Image (cartoon, rainbow, N blue to C red):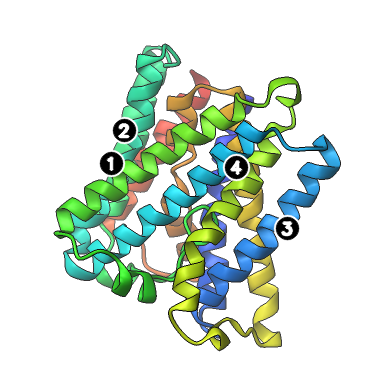
Amino acid sequence: MIAALLAVGASIAYGASDVTAGVASRRVPAIAIAWWSHVVGAAGTGALALAAAGRPPAAGLALGSAAGAIAGAGLLVYYGALARGQVSVVAPLAASGIAVPVVVGAVTGAAPGPLGWAGLALAATGVVVVARSRSAADEPNPPCPGGRPGCPEEEGARAPRLPPVLGALLAAAAFGVTFVLIDLAGRAGGGAAAASPLWTAAGLQAGGLLVLVPVLLAGPVRRVAVPRAALPPLALTAVLVSAGDVALALALGTGDLATVSVLGSLDSVVSVLLARLVLTERLGRVQGVGVAAAVGGAVLLAAA
């Protein structure tokens, strides 16, 4: 139950960060949001981990950094696929990456019971339906910082020129592998296992930051200048993403991979709901069905 709640909390933090990043993107380029949220996130989570756990476990930090870098690379390919293909095709294919940790969890014996499987199927279906219902206007705003660094207007242009379907499938694989690596990182802490999720979260931020470096250097560095008016939403975005990374790492360190991965992938559902409640955006009928399915699946998983 605690792992499930942490995973849902991670999705809420990620989804809320999408909304605050969208607000910040009205004043600064998305690359500035992504860059500074990673800088602040890596520094903040690193300092917290150092204070709480001392020296980092090498394996946990390395796996967390690899997860952040792979997630960032997956976003690069994903935005390239969005730029060249139909959102209604690319988005659900990329969302299908949730199947990777589910399969790995089942193979390794860390799978839920019958009620849990029903919840997994329902929640995963909801995530794919919400992704399928997104329009071109929904992408790439708001950008997705954190473990999924967002500067899509640049990343899409610099992504490998792959066929859209292939790019979407590669992105799905990257997103799925990210969950598996975070899970492995949380279990690689040795004697510091209780605190290793903090170092995993710091690694996620650092790995994502490394992916952003070539994107930043590919254009004028002044793009990351931030006016004072944009500081509050930008700071809140960084805090929310960091909190999401920590909650996800903690959840994967204490719960089973399949359940936590699905519940930790509901950020798109959360962002749709928040956009409806906070920004008064219209919720389409298909999106409503997807949201209902995802919420119902999450309730089943939490009760399993």
Residue under circle 3? 43
* Residue reaching furthest to the right: 51
Q: CA distance from mark 3 to mark 2?
A: 32 Å
The secondary element bearing badge 2 is classed as helix
N-terminal label among 3 and 2: 3
Residue at the (44%, 45%) spot, across then down: 266
Q: CA distance from mark 4 to mark 3?
A: 22 Å
The secondary element bearing badge 1 is classed as helix
N-terminal label among 1 and 4: 4
**Of the residues tagged 3 and 1, which is closer to the observer?**
3
The secondary element bearing badge 3 is classed as helix
Query: Which label number is shown at residue 129?
Result: none
Q: CA distance from mark 3 to mark 1?
A: 32 Å
Residue under circle 1? 96
| x and y, in percent, of residue 17 in the image | 56, 61
Q: Which is more toward the observer, 71 or 115?
A: 71
**Of the residues tagged 4 and 2, which is closer to the observer?**
2
Q: CA distance from mark 1 to mark 2?
A: 6 Å
N-terminal label among 3 and 1: 3
| x and y, in percent, of residue 213 in the image | 51, 68
Residue under circle 4? 9
Q: Is residue 291 above or below residue 276?
A: above
